[in-house]
Amino acid sequence: MTEKTISELNTSRPDDYDDIVNLVRSSCGDKVVLPGVLVSEILSNLPVKSLIRFQTVCKPWNRFIFSPAFINKHLHRKNPQLGGYSKFCDKEFYSHKDEFVFPAVVDFIVGACNGIICIKTSHIEKSLILFNPATREFSFLAKDECDGTIFGFCYIYKTQEYQVIAFKEKRHVNNIDIKILTMGKTKSLREVRDVVLPGRITDSRQATSGTTMVWLGVDHEEVNDIVICYDAIEERFSRIDVPPYDSPPHLWTRSLRVLKESVIMFVYSNYEANTSFDIWTLIIDEGSKDKHWMKYRTIGPLKTGGIMWPIEVCWYEKWILCRKDGNDQEDLKYRSNDLFYYDLETDQVEDYNKLTDPPIQEFVNYVESLVSIKSLVQSVDTNY
């Protein structure tokens, strides 16, 4: 590597860059030939599986790899993964590399942030799991930490903390109590009472943009479809109407996902001949927090040999994973060979070749991370 290249690496360094370099140099001693900055760059671009093997080289290397500075640096590498679980084998989580069996039945995936996936299970006393697919580490959250029927999960970059919220909707009651579990530099559990909920949530799967969590819902009169938003900093809810269409709302299906760190909405027709869908982006003004929808693009019509619908955005913005049903039979809707990718850059369609038995029902995007689940969940202080 030339001096110019090393200099270029310095221009985009994180705030804790000097700490990382010093730690590399102190760990390697006089034996290292490569500059500390180069060693740090090489290691930060390795997969988690390799880094875990390297931790056994010596104690200084173990300390370096699991230092907060290096973990944060490693998170900046763009290494998106696609995982999911099966409708027919409820305890197994699949990635493109391997599979993992949970000790409880998976109900649904709440969300994923910075390499950690929050999963709702059927366990009565411990209904939420925090799971790191890269390290295969997981931990249940106790019932008093996540007692609710609706959940949210986000990462607050300013404080470098993960946050789980849990609450129960009350029929014909607009005010709710929210439990907020914060994990990171500080670990606390507290309750915020009498928070106004502007509607009823109809889809338990959330999408997150920064510190804003969003769900699909309806207003209290159950007349208008809306999107319910929760700001983790201000600890309050707000609502926004769904994108407008000329035909009645019940003729359209909507789902929320994340594209380029922004919340998007897939909208597609319920007609049997559907071969296209729209993508809308939720624009959030950082200052005023005002929100509005902007149409990103229309995909299709696609020649897929049957009706189709979008499932997940993959690899940040390049692919959209879709499911097709050429035979229009209910039992075929979860076959892996009925999945295909749509390339946003080339407008090409390719078959999804990752076959699992049983097939995957729900997918989730995540990044590889060295974040320790154990360090997140230990010593939670309760403050009501």
Image: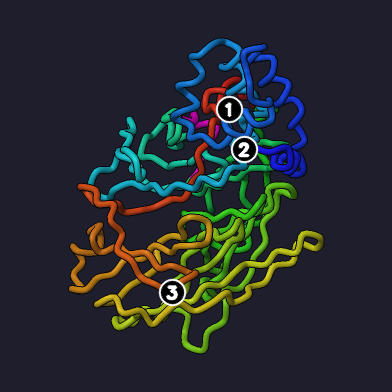
Packing grade of label 1 (10 A; few <14, some 14-19, many >=20) is some
Closer to the camera in the image, 321 or 288: 321
Q: Residue 156: percent from the left, percent from the top?
A: 68, 42
Q: Amino acid at mark 2?
A: Tyr
Crowding at label 2, few (<14), some or many (≥20) Cα neighbours within 10 Å?
A: many
Q: Earlier in the sequence, mark 3 or mark 2?
A: 2
Residues drawn in magenta = 138-148
Task: Tell me what residue is drawn at x 60 percent, y 45 percent.
Answer: 154
Mark 3 residue crowding within 10 angstroms, few (<14) / some (14–19) / many (20+): few
Question: In the displayed structure, does residue 125 sit left or right of residue 340?
Answer: right
Q: Quadrant of the C terminus?
A: top right
Q: CA distance from mark 1 to mark 3?
A: 41 Å
Q: Nearer the viewer, residue 16 or 338?
A: 16
Q: Quadrant of residue 301?
A: bottom left
Q: Which mark is residue 38?
A: none
Query: What amino acid is at disc 3?
Result: Asp
Percent x, y of residue 182: 64, 34
Which residue is under mark 1? 376
Along the polypeptide, which appears first: circle 1 or circle 3? 3
- In this rendering, would 121 be left or right of 92? right
Q: How is the image coloured?
A: rainbow
- Say which residue label 2 marks: 162
Q: Identify the residue at image location x=54%, y=27%.
A: 372
Does the rendering let one see residue 167?
no
Q: Please, what is the three-letter code of the amino acid marked with disc 1?
A: Leu
Q: Residue at x 28, y 69 (%)?
A: 324
Answer whether labels 1 and 2 touch (C-beta < 8 Å).
yes
Q: Give yes or no for residue 219 being in the magenta stretch.
A: no
The circle drawn on residue 347 is 3
Q: Is residue 246 left or right of residue 383?
A: left
Mark 3 secondary-structure assignment = loop
